[in-house]
Image (cartoon, grey):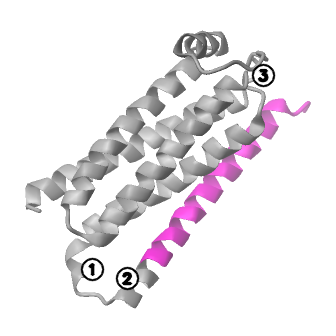
Amino acid sequence: MKSNQFKSLRVMVIITLILLTIQYELGMVINFSPNLPELPAFGFSLMKISEALHQAGTVALAHAVVGSLLTLLSIFTLVLSLGSRIRSVQIFGSLGLLSLALAATGGVLFTLSGFQNDDYSLAMASNFILSFIFYFLELYLLKRQKKLSELNWSQRVKLSMRCLTQCLKVIYVREAETQVGAMAKFSPI
């Protein structure tokens, strides 16, 4: 893969991470919103999904649109990842698409349940975290590609685990801040 192709892949992964961050924020707004409608569960129909999202509000509709864009972007990112010929980048690109597709599936199923089944919401959130981690690792490995070619397998694993630990710390701190903010919002004080 040529240098400009690596640059294109890095840009695509960065855009994906930015959109995942926006998707997270939109999801948190929806999650803490008391205005989410309680609809009866319904079968798969794009028209009914659209109606349910419109009833849920503009933020829910934006969340669905960004999720759809992320799915398409992940497919393009995977194509570039597979062309990189770097095994770790290919693996994390594939895992990123898989976890993002599972998050999107959880979102569709949550909508089809009439916004009632929290298990689907949990699946959406869990797979979001995984996709963010996988794309972050892919970006990290792309930036470190020259140095990685000089490392052996066990050194690569150690490096990946250190990066994963740092990423989880950032997500944990962000989640704690969100929960503290939500508690303050509903606090009677």
Indicate the secondary structure of the residue bearing disc 3: loop
Residue 21 x %, y %: 48, 42
Q: Residues within 10 Å of mark 3 (few under 14, many from 20)?
A: few
Indicate the secondary structure of the residue bearing disc 2: helix
Depth check: 101 or 22 in front? 101
Q: CA distance from mark 1 to mark 3?
A: 48 Å
Numbered mark located on residue 148 in the image: 1
Q: Is residue 24 visible?
A: no
Does the magenta segment cover residue 174? yes
State the quadrant of the N terminus.
bottom left
Tell me: 84 left or right of 69. left
Residue at 63 percent of width and 50 percent of height:
126
Residue 91 x %, y %: 37, 65
Numbered mark located on residue 34 in the image: 3
From the image, give the main secondary structure of the stretch colored magenta: helix
Which three-letter amino acid code belongs to the residue tagged 2? Arg
Q: Residues within 10 Å of mark 1 (few under 14, many from 20)?
A: some
Does the magenta segment cover residue 186? yes
Which three-letter amino acid code belongs to the residue tagged 3? Pro
Tell me: 1 left or right of 34. left
Tell me: 90 left or right of 22. left
- According to the picture, the residue beneath numbered tag 2 turns out to be 156
Whether tag 2 and tag 3 are in contact, CB under 8 A, the answer is: no
Magenta segment, which residues? Answer: 160-189
